[in-house]
Image (cartoon, grey):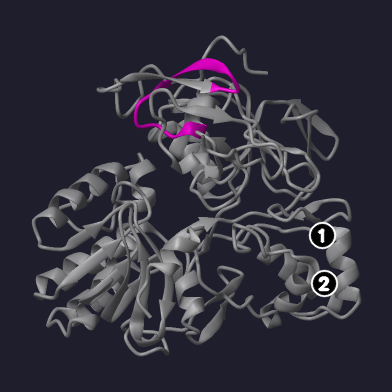
Amino acid sequence: MTRSTDIAIVGAGPAGIGAALAAARNGARVVIIDENSALGGHLRWTMARQSGFGDELDGLRGHEIASWATGLLANTGVEVLTSAVAWGLFDDNALGVLTADSSFQLHADRVIIATGSTDLTWPFPGWELPGIVTATCALRLLHLDRVLPGRRVAVVGAGSLAEQVVADLHACGGIAVARLPAVSDVTVGGSDRVEWIDDGGQRTVCDTVVLALGRQPDAQLALQAQVALTYSVDDGVFVAARDEALATSVAGVYVVGDAGGVNTPARAFAEGAVAGEAATGGTALASALERLRTIGRQTEPYPPLPAIADDTMVCRCEEVRANVLRAAIRDGAISLNDLKRRTRAGMGVCQGIYCNRAMAGMIASEAGVPIGSVVSMTARPPARLIPMAAMADLEP
Amino acid sequence: MTAQNETLRIDIHPVLGDNPRPTPVSVLFDGRPLAALAGESIATALWANGIVINRTMPDSGSPRGMFCGVGRCPDCMMTVDGELNVRTCVTPVRDGMVIETQQQLGTWKVRE
């Protein structure tokens, strides 16, 4: 099946919502796609009161803004596809879309990529043990599922995300038995699950470790579309190069929100509005840009990401340890693509999102080149795990 | 360590309050009955009951458990109603589901 629309938006967090509302206001046909069962992205499990969203919304909690947006979008004529995966972005702005009951190509005049951010991770000894979860996993457990991540929880990280995890854990009656600012001297151990965490010789008994180093931009579809990239010092990775209206080098493709560089939910919402206006030729573009300038950026210091010991697992999916990667790099594999081909690291289900940065860091330190010169791995469809039948169902 | 007989469920959430619609369901985990709530993910239901190991890895056979919680990594994949590699953190529980710890690559069962 093949469908078409004016505007396709991938991701229904604050950025995608901002884009959808702006585009719909200008009378465009809009389809918004999200892999979760409900709209709002990270806002759904954000309990803190928000600011920067505008007078109507400021003071509401994150999850309340998600509910507000869900109600509003239902009345704007925007077609909302939840539990739906946009797994590929092909020539002529055609998206491969898989929903619970259909698989189709969606041809869009404009595609707005609002796929947000994913937890920033970094390997350390024992991090593949059961009982270690990302901050996102812990926050979803607390607020979507109303389940404590553990009885005795250790939290790793020093930024606002770690603060949020600790505060929310305590508010829900949980106990953070240890806070570790960085992964530098951390080892986790246990027989078949987490039993202790050690920080430079200081050992704490725990049953859960939450990895809360920060977030990283996640824009697989933009990489697939081969938009021009630029190295973001704030994010420590390559991100889409964008003009003032957040358009990329590929005609009709925009990147907004955390997908283009991690920042606040309010900034993501405002970036969405800019692209939504620009993509529909709206008259409110100037005021949307002014609003974005007013909000500005709030960046955090980049966490220290130390050298990785030889026997530490780097690629969790394919079980590739640092010594194997180091040997391949010394053998001449000084690009991420080459390192992947030789070792399978980055080839697994996660598509490298949880190991690529460590691989790039290892190339940089072993080969003595700046990390900003280690370009991203080639991104190919599918961006998510989908059945082969989903692709077979598409018309050529 | 988490006691197996008490769950990690939050009785009253500090912001959200009481859970308005907790519909109990029952699933089979490795052959034993386990209490879950309708709508939650399989991995969450197990986690609430103190179960954090979902699978063993294909090559090493080492245990793995839910890590990303958003369907991106393979660590919570289990065998569910005979189907292999189900990402349990993004798959809702259903009453009567048969959930098995996936051993390495798992084994497809021929349907009768």
Mark 2–mark 1 Cα distance, whole angstroms, equals 8 Å
Circle 2/circle 1 CB separation < 8 Å: yes
Q: Who is closer to the viewer here, A358 or A86?
A: A86
Chain hosting mark 1: A
**Is residue B56 visible to us here?**
yes
Q: Who is closer to the viewer here, A294 or A152?
A: A152
Q: Residue furthest top?
A: B5
Classed neighbour count for the residue bearing mark 1: other residues with Cα under 10 Å, few (<14), some (14–19), many (≥20):
some
SS under mark 2: helix
Classed neighbour count for the residue bearing mark 2: other residues with Cα under 10 Å, few (<14), some (14–19), many (≥20):
few
- In the rendered structure, the answer to whether residue A187 lies left or right of residue A284 reads right
Membership of B37 in magenta stretch: yes
Task: Judge whether A7 appears above or below A43 on screen.
Answer: below
Residue kind at label 1, given as amino acid type: Ala
Q: Which label was assigned to residue A307?
A: 1
Q: Which label was assigned to residue A365?
A: 2
For the point 73% across and 44% down, the residue is: B57
The boundaries of the magenta stretch are B29-43
Q: Residue A158 at x, y = what percent? A: 61, 47
Q: Who is closer to the viewer here, B107 or B23?
A: B107
Residue kind at label 2, given as amino acid type: Ser
Q: Residue A244 at x, y = what percent? A: 34, 85
For the point 51% across and 39% down, the residue is: B88
Q: Who is closer to the viewer here, A244 or A238?
A: A238
Q: Residue furthest front?
A: B112
